Amino acid sequence: MTKYAHFDAADYLDDEETIAEYLTAALEDPDPDVFLTAVRDVARAKGMTQLAKDAGLGRESLYKALTPGAKPRYDTMLKLLHALGVKLSASPAHP
């Protein structure tokens, strides 16, 4: 029987460029839970308590906002992304 090591994306999200690429890839998936999961991975990599503080949110509010199936407010997501050091941008769908 083959044994596999546990993979945790948070272990590899250690700089803003990698974080931005990871979140951009997650945005390409039509399932919004994929993006929430990616933001949660980044939040865990940065530290949930510190991120909540940097974003001006309560720690419980942060966990609730990043739960699969959650529908976080736009302003909450902007605060989180700003605290993570990334921003959203738009580009033409058909270049």
Image (tube, rainbow, N blue to C red):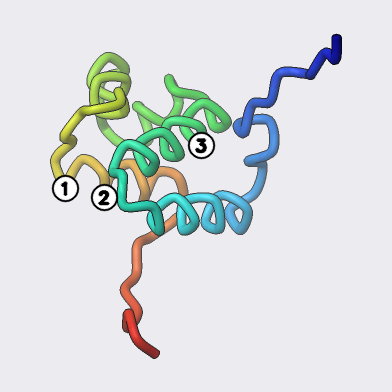
Residue pictured at 64% horizontal, 26% vertical: 8
Check the image and name the residue furthest to the top.
1
Count how many numbered circles sit on residues in the image. Answer: 3
Q: Which residue is mark 1?
A: 74
Q: Which mark is residue 78?
A: 2
Direction from residue 8 to residue 78 in the image, left or right: left
Dot label at residue 34 = none
Q: Work out how far the residue at label 3 is from the one at label 2, CA to CA, in angstroms.
A: 14 Å
- Report how far apart the C-alphas of labels 2 and 1 lie in the structure: 6 Å
Q: Looking at the image, which residue sits at the far bottom?
A: 95
Mark 1 and mark 2 in contact (Cβ < 8 Å)?
Answer: yes
Could you say whether the residue bearing mark 3 is in a helix, strand or loop? helix
For badge 2, the amino acid type reads Leu
Q: Secondary structure at mark 2?
A: helix
Residue position marked by numbered label 3 in the rendering: 42
Q: Earlier in the sequence, mark 1 or mark 3?
A: 3
Depth check: 29 or 64 in front?
A: 29
Q: Is residue 63 above or below residue 76?
A: above
Q: For mark 3, does the 10 Å Cα neighbourhood hold few (<14), some (14 to 19), or many (20 or more) residues?
A: many
Image height of 20 relative to 34, above or below: below
Residue 20 in picture, x, y percent from top left: 52, 56
The amino acid marked with disc number 3 is Val
Does residue 17 lie above or below 95 as drawn? above
